[in-house]
């Protein structure tokens, strides 16, 4: 299988980030609250080890509320300097996070002033896997469209500094994956949440794998939205067929349009229309 989820601009960004980081105090890592494990970039640990590490569980509005709380607790106990959930598209939600981040930045400025007698600019970078909401977060942080955003992975191609004031600036970075991404479940999770372009599977296979892996979690949402009880079917493709029937998604000649239906199921999940579903609950995964 020849899928290029690790394109040249990611290789280049990793190289350049090493230099950028010399002047950076704070790293704000965005992870997708629906898949808090799959959206951890293992290459970040080494890169950001000595920085003030802030973890934001983004797209929290699409994830289960109770799970969000549990994940915050779990990640805090793992030693991050700050862990919060955020809906990066919602200015009010970003405002809360901004307050906390600016306070951290102020603490750093004060410490440097006390120790070295210097007024410094505190620099932060926003990093994460593709499509996790980094640029959207930065735009709402500044209340202005400073960076380009889009609902597909790989929109930001280069690093970009944005200034808050002479005291504080933030760098937007391209979404970064890792070269040895081979775990099938991680791949599925990242494809369903749209961090990896769907080049791995055809749409029906993607939806089938999704339904196979998460049938129970999807049960209520699928019932409510399509009137289909997923537990009645053992073969995922039969579920897609059942949704086709209910929604009358037919091709010419009256044959079920499985492709369109599979795409609809994935898009509905991505948009939260099947409910707020965390695919990687902290409790179950820890067992
Ligand atoms: N529901 C929801 N949507 C979000 C959230 N954050 C971002 N989005 C949407 O997700 C999509 C991706 O947002 P971007 O800000 O472009 O993501 P990015 O991390 O900069 O992506 P790359 O530059 O490709 O790495 C956009 O359609 C946003 O509107 C969030 O917290 N909740
Ligand atoms: Mg971006």
Image (spheres, helix red, strand yellow):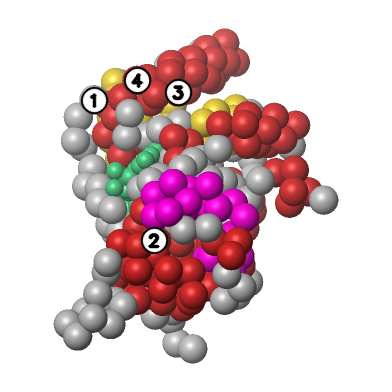
Q: Residue at x 34, y 57 (%)?
A: 267
* Residue at the outermost right position: 287
Report the residue marked by disc 3. 97
Report the residue marked by disc 1. 143
Tell me the element at label 2. Answer: helix
Q: Is residue 61 visible?
A: yes
Give the crowd class for mark 4: few <14, some 14-19, many >=20 residues within 10 Å. some
Q: Return the disc, 3 or 2, that comes first in the chain's sequence.
A: 3
Q: Position of residue 254 (x, y in %)?
A: 23, 81
Q: Return the disc, 1 or 2, that comes first in the chain's sequence.
A: 1
Instruction: Relative to 265, say whether 283 is above or below.
Output: above
Q: Residue at x 47, y 51 (%)?
A: 223
Give the crowd class for mark 3: few <14, some 14-19, many >=20 residues within 10 Å. many
User: Which of the two discs, 4 and 2, sits closer to the camera?
Assistant: 2
Residue 91, located in which quarter of the rendered image?
A: top left
Report the residue marked by disc 2. 265
Q: Is residue 121 left or right of residue 183?
A: left
Give the crowd class for mark 2: few <14, some 14-19, many >=20 residues within 10 Å. many
Separation of marks 3 and 4 at Cα, in angstroms: 9 Å
Q: Position of residue 220 (x, y in %)?
A: 53, 47
Q: Is residue 118 left or right of residue 69?
A: left
- The magenta segment is 209-227
Mark 1–mark 4 CB contact (< 8 Å) = no
Tell me the element at label 1. Answer: loop
Separation of marks 3 and 2 at Cα, in angstroms: 32 Å
Separation of marks 4 and 2 at Cα, in angstroms: 30 Å
Q: How many marks?
A: 4
Q: Return the disc, 4 or 2, that comes first in the chain's sequence.
A: 4
Q: Is residue 128 visible?
A: no
Separation of marks 1 and 3 at Cα, in angstroms: 13 Å
């Amino acid at each position: 299988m020849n899928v290029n989820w690790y394109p040249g601009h990611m290789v280049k960004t990793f190289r350049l980030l090493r230099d950028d980081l010399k002047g950076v105090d704070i790293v704000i890592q965005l992870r997708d609250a629906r898949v808090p494990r799959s959206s951890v970039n293992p290459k970040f640990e080494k890169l950001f080890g000595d920085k003030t590490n802030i973890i934001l569980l983004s797209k929290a509005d699409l994830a289960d509320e109770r799970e969000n709380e549990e994940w915050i607790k779990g990640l805090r106990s793992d030693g991050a300097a700050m862990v919060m959930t955020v809906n990066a598209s919602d200015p009010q939600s970003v405002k809360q996070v901004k307050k906390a981040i600016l306070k951290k930045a102020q603490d750093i400025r004060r410490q440097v002033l006390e120790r070295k007698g210097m007024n410094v600019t505190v620099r932060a970078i926003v990093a994460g896997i593709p499509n996790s909401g980094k640029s959207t977060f930065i735009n709402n942080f500044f209340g202005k469209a400073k960076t380009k955003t889009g609902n597909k992975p790989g929109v930001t191609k280069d690093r970009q500094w944005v200034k808050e004031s002479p005291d504080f600036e933030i760098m937007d970075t391209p979404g970064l994956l890792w070269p040895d991404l081979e775990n099938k479940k991680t791949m599925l999770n990242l494809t369903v949440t749209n961090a990896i372009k769907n080049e791995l599977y055809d749409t029906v296979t993607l939806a089938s794998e999704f339904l196979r892996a998460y049938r129970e979690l999807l049960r209520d949402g699928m019932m409510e939205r399509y009137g289909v009880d997923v537990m009645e079917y053992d073969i995922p493709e039969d579920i897609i067929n059942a949704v086709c029937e209910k929604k009358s998604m037919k091709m010419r000649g009256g044959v079920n349009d499985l492709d369109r239906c599979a795409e609809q199921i994935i898009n509905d999940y991505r948009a939260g229309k099947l409910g707020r579903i965390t695919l990687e609950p902290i409790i179950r995964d820890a067992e």
